[in-house]
């Protein structure tokens, strides 16, 4: 693990999305950590203290909105920026995501360059 790289925790149940994000960020200043579901993502966030979290909304068991809510209530993770990465394209869904504590919202399929820009913005602010 390169200590100079910023850690991104990607919580998503779709392994294809995980591979796309990894490929999109390959060679960047970001190191990708992954969790395939919300509960595991919360554990990973508490353990690794990532610089930013990318979070899917539609996941089995613990959905992304609930996961975000938990992360924002835990002292160790409450200040980590969360960016939703979701196929939900509704404006209502985006407003709900921001209301539970997300700092940004990216719609799938995503533009790799836009993802990189938004991750950089999240770790700077």
Image (tube, rainbow, N blue to C red):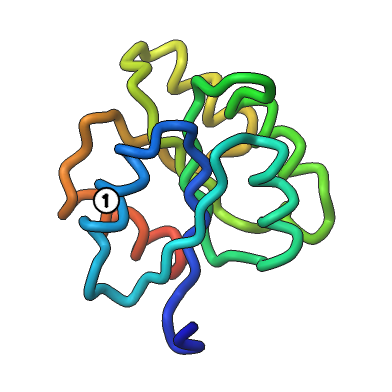
Give left or right: position of 19 versus 52: left
Q: Could you tell me residue 82's position as x and y percent?
A: 53, 47
Q: How many marks?
A: 1
Q: Residue at x 30, y 57 (%)?
A: 22
Q: Could you tell me residue 120's position as x and y percent?
A: 34, 65
Q: Could you tell me residue 40's position as x and y percent?
A: 68, 44
Give the residue pinned by disc 1.
115
Q: Could you tell me residue 66's position as x and y percent?
A: 69, 26
Query: Would you identify the image quadrant in which residue 26 lies?
Result: bottom left
Residues 40 and 52: in front is: 40
For label 1, count other residues whose C-alpha is less than 10 Å away and answer few (under 14), some (14-19) or many (20+).
Answer: some
Q: Is residue 102 above or below residue 113?
A: above
Q: Is residue 90 above or below residue 67?
A: above
Q: Residue at x 42, y 80 (%)?
A: 5
Q: Residue at x 18, y 50 (%)?
A: 112
Give left or right: position of 30 versus 66: left
Q: Is residue 16 above or below residue 107?
A: below
Q: Residue reaching furthest front?
A: 15
Residues 100 and 41: in front is: 41
Give left or right: position of 84 versus 89: right
Residues 82 and 92: in front is: 82
Q: Residue at x 27, y 29 (%)?
A: 108
Q: Secondary structure at mark 1?
A: helix
């Amino acid at each position: 693990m390169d200590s100079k790289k910023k850690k991104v925790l990607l919580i998503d149940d779709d392994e294809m999305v995980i591979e796309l994000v990894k490929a999109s960020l390959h060679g960047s200043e970001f190191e990708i950590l992954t969790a395939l579901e919300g509960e595991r993502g919360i554990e990973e966030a508490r353990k690794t203290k990532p610089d930013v979290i990318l979070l899917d909304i539609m996941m089995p068991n613990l959905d992304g909105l609930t996961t975000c809510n938990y992360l924002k209530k835990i002292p160790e993770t409450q200040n980590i920026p969360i960016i939703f990465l979701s196929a939900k394209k509704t404006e209502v869904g985006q407003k709900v995501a921001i209301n539970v504590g997300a700092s940004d919202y990216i719609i799938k399929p995503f533009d790799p360059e836009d993802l990189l820009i938004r991750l950089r913005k999240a770790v700077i602010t």
